[in-house]
Image (tube, grey):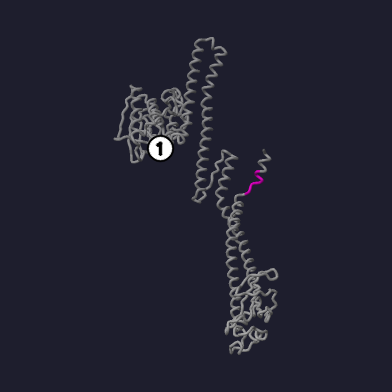
């Protein structure tokens, strides 16, 4: 398996090179097609120009020799077609032979002019020509081969201008030397341009994909760091590209942050449970050891040990239940993100329940709302928060058994306040009152059955739904806990909150007030 992995890694080809290669192939194909079209078009134009030269030469020779009425003779042709023609013959007073179009055509290196009589005997030859003479009934220009290369041959019968009789034949051969030379030069230029285009495309493609892959390299480096060290706080830096890769980086950072929170929560959970369970386990073990040594024979000691062990067992059960509640509260956004609850309904329900359970307390309600108020929160979670706060208020109202509740709204939030008139909390303790297992008076809190988790659960629940919970207190005068939650901008229909009422999912099967009320500490 290791050998397979090694070979797979060895055969790995960078995406930059793949991109550069396939980009070059694409550019090569496009440039080749364009070059072929350009080459064909340009050579066709050159070939057409050569045909025009042959056609012009045929016309000129035919015009010059058409003055004869009888079949051509060698002396007649030489007289009109040799460069040393007199001005009288050419019909011009200018002795410059280059002003004569025929002479210019004959002077071309690749043009060969031959004149034949009616029997096919050569009367005139401007240059040596390897092309055999063929008669023709009318002017024609065709392609042939000379020394293995393409050439053009034009043939035209010569007719007398005086009586229209056939007097001979003219044959013009173009070896296409200029055409072949220009075509070769053009081909070399196009090949160079193709190579430059492909090389440029490869370089630009490599540089471009290297820049495009830079964010992916950053993401890969971050993943490798986290993979090597799960506790690493490495994150993808700000890519500043404002594209899909930047969104992916933000998503990855959010996932890493969430994963890190879950890891921290798991570690914290294990540490907290280990720490808190150490004492009740030690107490139970101590009583069992005592019973094994001598206490089982003493009924009083036996009863006392069993009661103490049962009490510690109940406290462990309460602790584990609250720790599970807190662990689930850390993952609310995954399971209850779309739940909607009528705050007024839950508020009144909890108020009526506590008024019935604690008839010795005076509950005062101040409700400033006129309509139903809906917030994004799971119904049982809101109920649990109110139960925790009310339970704390009751436990620490020893002298003045009175609790005030209020419900009010602002432009965007709903406020729930619970005030007691108990022992209060000092300024130093208020900064830590929502910490796990924190108690203001640890001895009294343990006597009341608290584990120091209730307010932590309430705090985490409220924050998970984008709200906040605060406390104001004064030693000896009591405390006020306030919960603020964002109100739904668009009120749901009347049956929208039915799933909340029918749902049987709970953070815990038991309310904190049943066995493990948490003190304000």
> Can the viewer see residue 521?
no
Q: Is 302 drawn above or below residue 190 in the view shown?
A: above
> Can the viewer see residue 234?
yes
Check the image and name the residue furthest to the left: 370
User: In this orientation, which residue lies closer to the viewer: 151 or 270?
Assistant: 151
Q: Is residue 11 magenta?
A: yes
Could you tell me which secondary element the residue under label 1 belongs to? loop
Image quarter where the C terminus lies is: top left
Image quarter where the N terminus lies is: top right
Q: Position of residue 169 (x, y in %)?
A: 64, 79
User: In this orientation, which residue lies closer to the viewer: 153 or 261?
Assistant: 153
Task: Left or right? Give the position of 396 relative to 181.
Answer: left
Task: Left or right? Give the position of 102 relative to 517.
Answer: right
Q: Position of residue 77 (x, y in %)?
A: 65, 84
Q: Position of residue 31 (x, y in %)?
A: 59, 60
Q: Is residue 274 magenta?
A: no
Residues drawn in magenta: 8-13
State the residue at coordinates (58%, 88%). Answer: 92
Q: Is 359 drawn above or below residue 145 in the view shown?
A: above
- Disc 1 designates what residue? 467
């Amino acid at each position: 398996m290791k050998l397979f992995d090694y070979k797979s890694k060895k055969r790995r080809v960078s995406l930059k090179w793949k991109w550069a290669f396939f980009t070059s192939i694409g550019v090569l194909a496009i440039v080749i097609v364009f070059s072929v079209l350009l080459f064909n078009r340009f050579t066709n134009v050159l070939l057409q120009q050569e045909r025009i030269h042959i056609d012009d030469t045929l016309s000129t020779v035919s015009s010059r020799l058409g003055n004869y009425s009888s079949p051509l003779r060698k002396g007649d042709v030489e007289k009109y077609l040799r460069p040393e023609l007199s001005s009288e013959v050419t019909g011009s007073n200018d002795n410059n032979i280059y002003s004569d179009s025929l002479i210019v055509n004959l002077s071309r290196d690749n043009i060969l002019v031959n004149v034949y009589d009616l029997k096919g005997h050569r009367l005139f030859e401007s240059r040596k020509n390897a092309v055999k003479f063929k008669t023709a009934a009318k002017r024609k220009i065709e392609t042939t081969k000379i020394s293995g290369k393409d050439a053009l041959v034009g043939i035209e019968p010569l007719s007398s201008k005086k009586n229209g009789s056939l007097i001979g034949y003219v044959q013009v051969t173009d070896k296409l030397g200029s055409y072949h030379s220009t075509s070769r030069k053009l081909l070399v230029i196009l090949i160079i341009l193709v190579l430059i285009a492909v090389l440029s495309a490869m370089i630009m493609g490599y540089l471009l994909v290297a820049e495009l892959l830079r964010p992916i390299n950053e993401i890969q480096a971050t993943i490798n760091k986290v993979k090597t060290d799960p506790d690493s706080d490495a994150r993808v830096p700000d890519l500043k590209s404002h594209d899909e890769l930047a969104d992916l980086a933000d998503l990855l950072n959010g996932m890493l942050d969430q994963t890190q929170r879950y890891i921290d929560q798991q570690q914290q959970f294990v540490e907290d449970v280990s720490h808190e369970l150490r004492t009740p386990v030690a107490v139970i073990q101590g009583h069992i050891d005592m019973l094994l040594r001598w206490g089982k024979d003493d009924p009083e000691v036996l009863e006392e040990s069993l009661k103490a062990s049962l009490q510690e067992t109940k406290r462990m059960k309460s602790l584990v239940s609250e720790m599970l509640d807190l662990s689930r509260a850390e993952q609310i956004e995954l399971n209850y993100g779309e739940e909607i609850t009528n705050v007024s309904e839950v508020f009144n329900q909890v108020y009526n329940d506590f008024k019935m359970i604690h008839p010795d307390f005076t509950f005062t309600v101040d409700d400033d709302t006129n309509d139903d108020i809906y917030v994004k929160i799971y119904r049982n979670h809101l109920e649990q928060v109110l139960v925790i706060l009310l339970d704390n208020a009751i436990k620490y109202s020893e002298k003045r058994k009175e609790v005030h509740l209020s419900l009010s709204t602002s432009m965007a939030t709903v406020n729930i306040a619970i005030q007691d008139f108990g022992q209060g909390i000092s300024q130093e303790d208020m900064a830590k009152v929502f910490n796990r297992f924190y108690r203001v008076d640890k001895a009294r809190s343990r006597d009341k059955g608290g584990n120091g988790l209730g307010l932590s659960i309430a705090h985490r629940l409220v924050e998970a739904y984008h709200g906040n919970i605060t406390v104001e207190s004064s030693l000896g005068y009591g405390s006020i806990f306030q919960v603020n939650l964002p109100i739904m901008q668009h009120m749901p229909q009347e049956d929208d909150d039915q799933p909340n009422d029918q749902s049987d999912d709970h953070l815990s099967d038991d309310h904190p007030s049943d066995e493990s009320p948490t003190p304000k500490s």
